Amino acid sequence: MRSPSPAEKSQEENRVAEGTALLEQLASRVVEARAASDERRAGMAGAVNALMARLPAQVEPEAGAALLQRLLEEGSLEGLVDEAGQPSSIAATRTLLELGYPHALAMTPERLEALRRWRPRRQRVPWVAIAGTLFLSFIAQVAFMTLGDSSRLLFQMSLAALTGEVEPPELTWLQQLEQVMYFHREEVFVGQLLANFAAFLLAVTVGWTHRGHWLARRTFFGIAAASLVVGGLQVVPSGWLAMTTWTAGAGALVSGLLMRKR
């Protein structure tokens, strides 16, 4: 039988060292997850489940199975549920089965039955409430855009023209900003409308999945944050114009908050 070469020995030692580090990281994350607040526990549980999923490919089966069985027997995984609704005990059971013989035979019938019965939780998308919120914000946008006052800068420029000034006065940087925000108000209006509609479609089509739910919620919050900034700049030419933008942002913010209720 051929003895392993120095390079092969070095690779094996590195693999064992990486596996040991992974097991230590997993044990540490479990302790951190159990001590985390309710708001952070689901995210920490997701990290624990992700580490367990790596065990079959990166650690020795005996070492990985010993740690998982100890965590299950001690009850260290009880109460840990990730954001997708998967309990860490279910993830540990699945990993033990993937580690193969003889570790799969050590599982109790109760844990195997719990794994068989568990199904991924579908995220709830309150699309009716979101659609109603975005529709009301759109109506308010149209009202503010229609009834709002005009730019103070345009009024000043018209007065200058009436007095017969041939050359318009040089604009300050604030007046230039005012001019840009006012003359591009339609682009902002249409952009917000399309952004909110795209976020709504994202929520309806893939919001039932964990990743899609997270992405749609973050998209709504991103639109709300951008609307807050742009509306702040639009205050310079017109307060009514800023209200138009902030209204769309408020609709996006409420929609994102609605998606937090599962």
Image (tube, grey):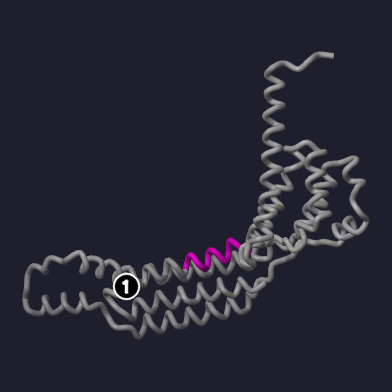
Residue position for label 1: 234
Question: Is the magenta region chiefly helix, strand or loop?
Answer: helix
Amino acid type at circle 1 is Gln
119 horizontally vs 50: left or right = right
Crowd class of label 1 (few under 14; some 14 to 19; many from 20; radius 10 Å): many
The residue at 71%/52% (across/down) is 49
Residue 238, placed above or below residue 67? below
Residue 3, placed above or below residue 110? above
Tell me if residue 145 is in the magenta stretch: no
Q: Nearer the viewer, residue 177 or 30?
A: 30
> Residue 50, position in %: x, y?
69, 50
Q: Nearer the viewer, residue 170 or 112?
A: 112
211 horizontally vs 247: left or right = right
The residue at 11%/68% (across/down) is 169
Residue 59: quarter of image: top right
Q: Nearer the viewer, residue 259 or 1?
A: 1
The magenta span reads 213-223
> Residue 88, position in %: x, y?
75, 57
Tell me if residue 216 is in the magenta stretch: yes
Residue 80: quarter of image: bottom right
